[in-house]
Image: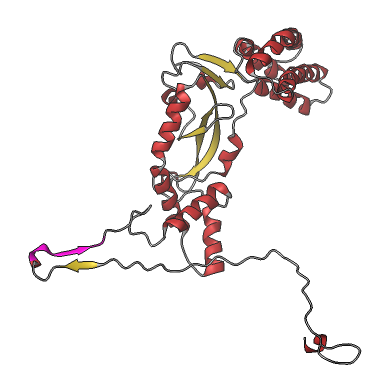
Amino acid sequence: MPEQCKCGGCGAETKVIGYEVSEVLDVKPAEYFVQVTKREKRACKKCEEQGVATAPVAARIIDKSLASDRIIINTIVGKYGDHNPLYRQSVILLRDAGIDIGRATMCGWVMTVGEMLAPVVGAMRSQLLAGSYIQADETPIDVQAHDRRGKNHQSYLWQYGSPGGSVVFDFRMGRDREGPAHFLVNFEGILQTDGYAAYDRGIGGPKMVHAACWSHARRYFVDAIKLNKQDAGSVRIVELMDKLFAIDARARDETMDHAARHALRQQEAPRLLDKIHTQILTMSGSVLPKSAAGKACNYALRLWKRLNIFLEYPELELSKAMVSYCTSLWGLSWAGVSSVC
């Protein structure tokens, strides 16, 4: 301001002798524009029979689409990287830029990109099946289908992965054995799952080893405690299982490799397993089979051999730490109808 540039004593104009610099983070709103591409058309005046030649069209994700590759990629990143569903992206575009793109159109982009990535998923599946250890799980997900009069159909997203490695998702309309049987055909390594019966028969090759998950076994006893906080038997079993997990936690803290962890397990786990087994057997005889505690005991005893397989295989984890939680953020379409995304 002019008055700030005058001396407070004599009123003369002051001189700039330096600057005080400060910084603040700011933002420039995204700018949307129409990109115009001109392709030359050429012809020879002497050879009219050769016709007109036009410069080739550059390869694009969706040919003849009004949206550029950048717009489509931003939509995919927004949906799967930022977990921003398509209907919300559509509303934001209309609000901030006045651009009206329906979610059905965006869903078409997503499906096209998914089809383009199918070979990548196939390579990931082949790599996974060539390994020695797979953890599997399935997560329910609602999908709209026009043959159900607007009602959602409960489908499943099956997940297959290895600790620290990639996860491959396999969408299925049902939860029957067909899904894992198709995906795991001829797999000869270790398969770790919960106690769902679909994994029991006709899955994998003849040499496949089926291991169970200690987190699932523990969870049933935790559920029993939630219903009855005076359930001393379930509390004791959970405490013993926690000590079992503490063995692996120590191995992680000390950055042990599989061989060192296996030696530690062999030293400390068997006595804990005996105590857990004895406690479950004792408890199963004193609770109702249909009670929460009874179901927890039956689950653990039914899978006891599979739960103990980790003593034989150094690479086997106590639980299958899959990324199931992320599947609830996925939006899918089916049979060409409006999707839940």
Please say whether residue 140 is visible from this viewpoint: yes
Q: What residue appears at the point 51 percent right and 60 percent down from the top-left corner?
A: 90
User: Residue 216's quadrant in the figure?
Assistant: top right
Q: What residue appears at the point 8 percent right and 64 percent down from the top-left corner?
A: 49
* 183 with respect to 58 (left or right): right
Query: Among all residues in the image, which is located at the extreme right?
Result: 9
Where is 220 relative to 61, above or below?
A: above
Query: Among all residues in the image, which is located at the extreme bottom?
Result: 11
Residue 144 locus on image (x, y percent):
47, 45
Question: Number of numbered discs present?
Answer: 0
* 325 with respect to 144 (left or right): right
Where is 103 relative to 4, above or below?
A: above
- State the extent of the magenta-drawn residues as a range: 49-55
Residue 161 locus on image (x, y percent):
53, 28
Does the magenta segment cover residue 54? yes
Report the quarter where the N terminus lies. Answer: bottom right
Does the magenta segment cover residue 337? no
